[in-house]
Image: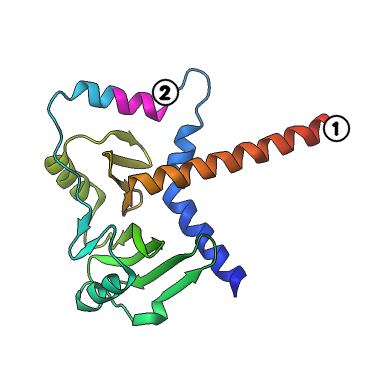
């Protein structure tokens, strides 16, 4: 059972961090995401509107009980109560996974220390398209800080929002995102060192 939850956690975490971690691995002559972000911000003299931490009645930082209550009351989600809630022994986290109706096909919520830090909504592309959602975000919050073929990302000191292809919208607490990204990069560096040590043994 623990192995099943561990595998699900790693899949969810990979989805949340994968694009950012891949973007951080730039080779010679490539532009880092930090440089792209700084260039974008430097080119936009106007202060951007504050990024939302709330979608409908779902808010980053809310408790598990508040999250379950909000999902039960929202007609866009087919939330089945505790059957859709898993406890993840890694870092004492909870994962809430539910299907949706209409525009939302599937939703994932991750909590750490009892607080919601990540929300991911996979959209029904038969009813809503990537361009429409992207256009709304640009109109409300300005040009993205990071833009590449896989994702558009808006970042502030507190919040990170990504629109990923084919069409998933993700909200994440920026502080937790940085902590998880640092952990992932440290783990990858350790694995690279182990590989180099192995190769040098020949």
Task: Indicate the quadrant containing the N terminus: top left, top right, bottom left or bottom right.
Answer: bottom right
Q: Which residue is mark 2?
A: 31
Q: Position of residue 131 (x, y in %)?
A: 22, 46
The quarter of the picture where residue 68 lies is bottom left
Report helix, strand or loop for mark 1: loop
Residue at the (28%, 44%) spot, across then down: 158
Magenta segment: does it hold 34? yes
Give the side of residue 55 with respect to residue 115, left or right.
left
Of the pair 25 and 155, the residue shown nearer to us: 155
The quarter of the picture where residue 138 lies is top left
Work out which residue is located at the far right of the displayed protein and give it. 202
Return the disc, 2 or 1, that comes first in the chain's sequence: 2
Q: Position of residue 6 (x, y in %)?
A: 57, 64
Q: Main secondary structure of the magenta part?
A: helix
Report helix, strand or loop for mark 2: loop
Q: Position of residue 79 (x, y in %)?
A: 31, 78
Highlighted range, magenta: 31-38
Q: Is residue 107 above or below residue 155?
A: below
Residue at the (34%, 26%) spot, across then down: 36
Which of discs 2 and 1 lies nearer the camera? The answer is: 1
Residue at the (39%, 62%) spot, across then down: 111
Marking on residue 201 = 1
Q: Position of residue 41 (x, y in %)?
A: 24, 26
Q: Is residue 51 above or below residue 69?
A: above
Tell me the crowding category of disc 2: few under 14, some 14 to 19, or many 20 or more residues within 10 angstroms, Cα based.
few
């Amino acid at each position: 059972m623990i192995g099943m939850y561990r595998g699900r956690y790693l899949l969810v975490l990979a989805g949340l961090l994968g694009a950012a971690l891949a973007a951080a691995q730039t080779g010679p002559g490539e532009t880092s995401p930090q440089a792209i972000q700084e260039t974008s911000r430097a080119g936009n003299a106007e202060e951007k509107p504050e990024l939302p931490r709330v979608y409908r009645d779902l808010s980053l930082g809310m408790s598990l009980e508040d999250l379950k209550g909000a999902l039960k009351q929202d007609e866009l989600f087919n939330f089945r109560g505790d059957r859709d809630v898993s406890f993840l022994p890694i870092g004492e986290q909870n994962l809430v996974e539910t299907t949706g109706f209409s525009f939302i096909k599937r939703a994932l919520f991750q909590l750490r220390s009892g607080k919601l830090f990540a929300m991911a909504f996979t959209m029904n592309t038969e009813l809503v398209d990537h361009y429409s959602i992207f256009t709304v975000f640009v109109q409300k919050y300005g040009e993205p800080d990071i833009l590449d073929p896989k994702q558009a990302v808006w970042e502030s000191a507190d919040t990170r929002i990504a629109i990923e292809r084919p069409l998933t919208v993700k909200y994440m607490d920026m502080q937790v995102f940085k902590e998880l990204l640092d952990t992932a990069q440290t783990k990858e560096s350790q694995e690279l060192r182990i590989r180099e040590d192995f190769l040098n043994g020949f």
